[in-house]
Image: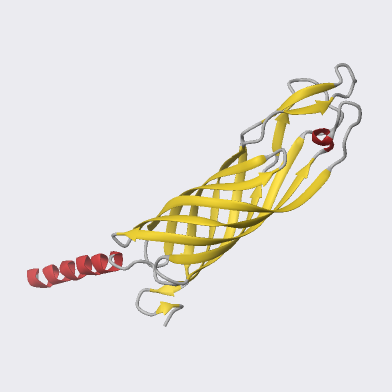
Amino acid sequence: MRGWKRSSIALLVSSVVASNAFAVAEGFYMGLMMGPSSSTGGDQQVKTSSGTPATTTVTPRSNQFGTRLFLGNKFSQYAGFELGGTFFSSIAYNNKGVDTCAGTTARVRDVDIVGKGEYTFQNTVGVFAKGGVAVTYLTTSGGLNSSATECGKNKQEIKYRPTVTVGASYDLNQNWVVDASWNRIMVGSIVNNVDFYALGISYHFVDKYCGQFLC
């Protein structure tokens, strides 16, 4: 009986060790990233509603939140690519109690395609970097497009902008991976850059013995 127990324990331990010994195989994956974000744009001059004084300074708040959904393909141990879409909450500008001629908010959304390079240590802990192009959609309310004499209108801008990411990941098993990352989208205009600090999780459609997809 004791010999049977020892054999069972040894088999269990060896199974766990073997399970952790395999890095995530190549193949398709999908995931979700979420976390706080902030813009690096500075103060803006906005027309007041009373006209006295003509303009007032508004300051962007740094309490946004971002969510990114993505699909990827890990085509080798060290490289892959991703297609993602990111949604950020509105950037509210603090008018410090002065009424402005129109709203003072900006919002960024994007669709991106990025290449990904990664290196894994001990088959479970990895570091990675991403770089590519984001198609950004920036909307700004009329106050942020005003002059000293005229209130502006709501504005929409679509631009192709660079995006970069660095981060670290941990393979929970052969299918599930968690990561933490810093992401920057170089939006331009009054927003300048959006920095996104995210925790992510992804599911890889692979099997540790068969590779891509299940047996």
Q: Is residue 199 above or below residue 44?
A: below
In the rendered image, the quadrant that contains the N terminus is bottom left
Locate residue 211, reporting x and y percent: 40, 77
The residue lying at 85 percent from left, 24 percent from top is 48
The residue lying at 65 percent from left, 50 percent from top is 87
Locate residue 17, reporting x and y percent: 24, 65
- Could you tell whether 6 is left or right of 155 in the image? left
Q: Residue furthest bottom?
A: 215
Q: Quadrant of residue 32?
A: bottom right
- 93 or 7, nearer to the observer: 93
- 113 or 124, nearer to the observer: 113
Locate residue 151, reporting x and y percent: 89, 32
The residue lying at 77 percent from left, 49 percent from top is 157
- 166 or 175, nearer to the observer: 166
- Could you tell whether 43 is left or right of 73 in the image? right
In the rendered image, the quadrant that contains the C terminus is bottom left
The type of colouring in the image is: secondary structure
**Mark count:** 0
Q: Quadrant of residue 145?
A: top right
